[in-house]
Amino acid sequence: MTKYRIAWMPGDGIGNDVMDAARIVLDRLALDAEYVPADIGWEFWRREGDPLPPRTVDTLKTCDCALFAAITSKPKAEASAELAPELQGKGLVYRSPIVRLRQLFDLYVNLRPCRALKGNPLNYRDDIDLVVFRENTQGLYAGVEFHPLPGEVRAALEAHSDNMRAFDGITDEDIAVSCRIFTREGCRRIVRSAFEYARECDYPTVTLAEKPNVLRETSGLMVREARQVSLEFPGIELWETNVDAMAMWLVKNPQDYGVLVASNMFGDILSDLAAQLVGGLGFAASGNIGDSFAVFEPTHGSAPKYAGQYKVNPTAMLLAIKLMLDWLKETSLARALQQAIEQVIAEGDARTYDLGGKASTLEVARAVAERL
Ligand code: NAI
Ligand code: MG
């Protein structure tokens, strides 16, 4: 028996390339783990009508956590058109498997560290050290959406909000609605996770990016709960900003911020902005973390045009492993991996195309492994 069972989900396209790189480094780290392959992605949508087959969910339930690389996804009409002939016309609807995993396993934290690695030519500044805590299960991505707007839903909205008058005379067919749903506990636990991280890693501030002046009810709830939670953490300041202003501040003075916390969509957008400040998709890793399970991934997609070419930067994938090691409390391995990655970037010999280099995905992984 190994100490850990880790689900292994390369997914599609360059997902396979970067997972091969991951394996080189994990083998070198000699983590006492079994890697359990699990099916996820476009191929399973096409062949089986489900990009996250039930057997995968069963496998995940037997694992400590999962490593996931990337999947392909396409808009509704295209997705239906690509289904195998025998699956056509059955009303199958494509839903993002990663969003489903977040909801199925209640992975409410999306952790996105964005730290400038020394010597990375893509850094916007060299002194950036941001960590985004994005709420991962609620808000605008809760999946409560309507189009056309059902009559009963419309009637209920009209009965409860005078602002619905602005849409009088527009047919149900011509209205689409996506609901932004926050719960008190949902707000509390993401803010608390951010503060706990700030305390553990010595960040003096936690910045909440919301929009309470306009989104009075949802952002309002988040702000009130954040103020309450912050009282449990004397010594760490809560800064409140509007999300639009935050986008400007992150470009103007990113070095002034530490831990950021935001709801699902705002956090999604801010974390991509923050990631680009420290090198972009080749460097952006994330953890989807719940109380008893977690999925770690690079945030890039399947980049079909590079699939199988072993050209893309594996650093994001390797940083995802680092997050996993932190979560498993394999602290010394996590630190060693971080140092090895930093060393390779700083030395600048093994660089993929995005950094102006010619090294392959696997050469970079081997360079990291050699320094471990
Ligand atoms: P993408 O992230 O796959 O690629 C966009 C571009 O970024 C690539 O063409 C490449 O130039 C660059 N890039 C991405 N990863 C890189 C790496 N590791 N090193 C160097 N350069 C890298 O996004 P795109 O093209 O919008 O989407 C392609 C597919 O991936 C779509 O089907 C999309 O739905 C899916 N996707 C999946 C995600 C996931 O699995 N979490 C996230 C984003 C997109
Ligand atoms: Mg995103």
Image (cartoon, rainbow, N blue to C red):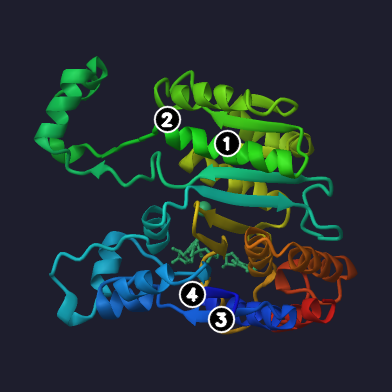
Q: Residue furthest top?
A: 162
Cα distance, mark 2 to mark 4? 33 Å
Q: Quadrant of the C terminus?
A: bottom right
**Circle 1 is placed at which residue position?**
192
In the picture as drawn, the residue positioned furthest to the front comes out as: 1
Q: Which residue is mark 4?
A: 9
Q: Compared with residue 174, is residue 87 higher up or lower down, i.e. above or below? A: below
* Label 3: few (<14), some (14–19) or many (≥20) C-alpha neighbours in 10 Å: some
Q: State which tag comes first along the sequence, 1 or 4.
A: 4
In the rendered structure, which disc, 4 or 3, sits on the residue that comes first in sequence? 4
Residue 184, can we see it? Answer: yes
Between the C-alphas of marks 3 and 2, the distance is: 38 Å
Q: Quadrant of the N terminus?
A: bottom right
User: Is there a contact, CB below 8 Å, between mark 2 and mark 4?
Assistant: no
> What kind of element bears circle 2?
helix
N-terminal label among 3 and 2: 3
C-beta proximity under 8 Å, tags 1 and 3 = no
Under mark 1, the amino acid is Arg
Mark 1, Cα crowd under 10 Å, few <14 / some 14-19 / many 20+, is some
Foreground of the two, 352 or 299: 299
Give the residue at x 56% y 63%.
296
Residues at marks 3 and 2 touching, judged by CB atoms closer than 8 Å? no
Q: Which mark is residue 184?
A: 2
Q: Residues within 10 Å of mark 4 (few under 14, many from 20)?
A: many
Q: Is residue 237 left or right of residue 176?
A: right
Residue that badge 3 annotates: 34
Q: Earlier in the sequence, mark 2 or mark 4?
A: 4
